[in-house]
Image (cartoon, rainbow, N blue to C red):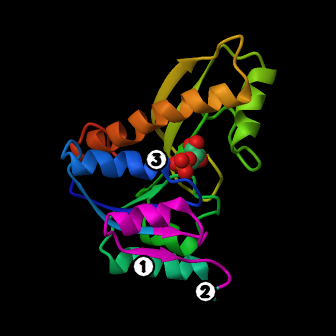
Amino acid sequence: MDLHLGFLASHRGSNVKSILDLISTKELDAYPEVIISNNADSAVLDIAIERGIPNYCLNKKNCMDVDEAIAYILKKHDVNLVILAGYMKKIGEKTLNVYPNRILNIHPSLLPKYGGEGMYGRNIHQSVINSNDLESGATIHIVNKEYDKGKIIAQYKIPRYILDTPETLEERVLKIEHILYPQTLIDIQKGIISLDL
Ligand code: GRF
């Protein structure tokens, strides 16, 4: 599958950067077509500018219908696979209808554990610690109408250490996210992972 990627992110953008880095070294055969954020101050927009990738800030302040604007921009840039990476807004029905089974998200837990509304950032890692789980990790899943509920296509587990704090666990999970997301895209590109349900 030829990968024409459209990215959505809200803050730091380290997962987007890890994917772009692998495209730059040609380890991942894909085209970064566009980067969208809802947050004008997101570092991901600086990453886009540095690398000359078309970029947009789309939110309620500048769009009547953010969902429609996202779907329009993704189509305009010939995106065929949408990559959510720390995008803090729900994807609307219009975008879901234009990209059925073609929107992916990364979540910093072993879904279905610690997913759903309110499960983001440190909350997730604190919950893993509170539950005394012996492992944690990251999950890539297909996005549907419900938060973190779509088909799981890849997971990477790491041990949870007794001395872990939410901060140390978050840091170690983020490191493996930077391996898991690009590797999953390589597997999709090579046909090893199928996105058809
Ligand atoms: C990551 O932990 C991702 O799993 C979650 O939000 C965080 C985004 O980090 N959905 P970054 O913006 O990619 O650095």
Q: Is residue 2 above or below residue 139?
A: below
- Considering the numbered disc 3 on the image, is that residue within a helix, a strand or a loop? helix
Q: Residues within 10 Å of mark 2 (few under 14, many from 20)?
A: few
At 23% from the left and 42% from the top, the residue drawn is 191
Residue pointed to by mark 2: 63
| 117 with respect to 155 (left or right) | right
> In which quarter of the view is residue 109 placed?
top right
Kind of element beneath mark 2: loop
Give the x, y percent position of residue 50. 36, 64
The residue that appears at 74% across and 50% down in the rendered structure is 117
Q: How far apart are marks 1 and 3 (CA)?
A: 21 Å
Q: Circles 2 and 3: CB distance less than 8 Å? A: no
**Disc 1 marks which residue?**
73
The dot on residue 15 is 3
Magenta stretch in the rendered image: 36-61
Q: Which amino acid does label 1 sit on?
A: Ile
Q: Earlier in the sequence, mark 1 or mark 3?
A: 3
Q: Which of marks 2 and 1 is nearer the N terminus?
A: 2
* Mark toward the start of the polypeptide (2 vs 3): 3
Q: Residue furthest top?
A: 162
Q: Nearer the viewer, mark 1 or mark 3?
A: 3
Q: Looking at the rendering, which quadrant does residue 93 occupy?
A: bottom right
Q: Which residue is drawn at 70% across and 17% down?
A: 133
| Figure check: 30 above or below 166 | below
Q: How many marks?
A: 3
- Mark 2 and mark 1: Cα distance apart in space: 12 Å
User: Is there any visible trace of residue 10 in the rendered image?
Assistant: yes
**Please, what is the three-letter code of the amino acid marked with disc 3?**
Asn
Horizontally, residue 91 falls left or right of residue 47, namely right
Whether 24 is among the magenta residues is: no
Name the amino acid type tagged 2. Answer: Cys
